Amino acid sequence: MQLHSNIIGTGKPFIILHGFLGMGDNWKSLGKRFAEQGYQVHLIDQRNHGRSFHSEFFDYSFLSEDLKNYCNFHQLEDIILLGHSMGGKTAMSFSVKYPEIVYKLIIADIAPKKYPLHHQDILKALSFLDFNKIDSRKKADEAIYKYVKSPGVRQFLLKNLFWVKKGKLGLRVNLPVLIKHIEEVGKALYENAVFYEETLFLKGENSNYIEIQDEFLIKKQFPNSEIITIQKAGHWLHAENPTDFCTEVFKYLS
């Protein structure tokens, strides 16, 4: 089964992988910027997310193979691969397994280490959405507010809403499977994995996803890497400071 994608522009293939509970459309604005610089941008929905297929199987080995199948189907070689958060873990896993396909690797605000569970409130909020009673985005927002106070996070989550039919809302994400396999999202890249090609790690100044002590592990598994901090940004650094984010990406690619 093929992943759903939105392909923008022409030129060297540039694949972007979203984070947990996200979708390719989250990157549409930046995708257009990259396309304007002469890249063919592929905004991919990973399995159980967005408009891509649902499956009972969910871990980074499956997500990596999905991307390999996607590259084979579209005959993509020497790709630029950018992944944010969970998408960054997929990008790392894919790159160490298929280094011959990856021209340049960009990892946004995630390290190859293991992360503890920290999405419980968000998953609980989505689990309690009763679409027999909720028939508008406003009502969904009000229901989520009980568990998620941040307006930005709620807006991000509400992008998963869609009209199943007239008057009936639903979620695009495969919530039961993601809840069942939530521990897979935080798993570390396997210990002996090494990617020797050029890699750019971008971290948010106000994020704790990449800490000082993580730099040793990053350099061990990605020895030809550079770590750059995006100022005035947290974990969603590409949305919070898109100008500096794009500047660093273009500097690295040039």
Image (cartoon, rainbow, N blue to C red):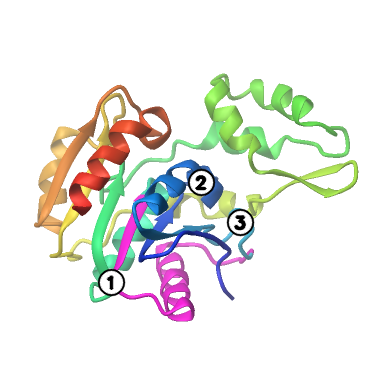
Question: Is 227 left or right of 15, judged from the image as shown?
Answer: left
Seen in the picture, residue 10 relative to 188 is either above or below; the reply is below
Tell whether 155 sits left or right of 232.
Answer: right
Element class at badge 2? helix
What SS does tag 3 mark?
helix
The residue that mark 3 highlights is 177
Q: Eyeballing the image, is 42 above or below 146? A: below
Q: Does the magenta stretch include residue 63?
A: yes
Judging by the rendered image, the residue that carries numbered circle 1 is 78
Tag 2 residue: 28
Lower sequence index among marks 2 and 3 = 2
User: As shown in the figure, which amino acid type bears the numbered disc 3?
Assistant: Val
Q: Where is residue 75 in the image (x, y as percent from the top left)?
A: 42, 80
Crowding at dot 3, Cα within 10 Å, few <14 / some 14-19 / many 20+, comes out as: some
Q: Where is residue 246 in the image (x, y as percent from the top left)?
A: 31, 40
Q: Which amino acid does label 2 sit on?
A: Lys
Spatial distance from mark 3 to mark 1, Cα to Cα? 33 Å
Q: Which residue is drawn at 26% across and 36% down?
A: 203
Question: Is disc 3 in contact with disc 1, using a CB cutoff of under 8 Å?
Answer: no
Query: To which quarter of the image does residue 146 belong?
Result: top right
| Residue 252 is one of the magenta-drawn residues | no
Mark 3 / mark 1, whichever is N-terminal: 1
Residue at (15% x, 59% y) in the render:
198
* Tag of residue 23: none
189 or 31, which is in the foreground? 31
User: Which label lies toward us, 3 or 1?
Assistant: 1
Which contiguous range is marked in magenta? 54-83
* x and y, in percent, of residue 103 in the image: 23, 66
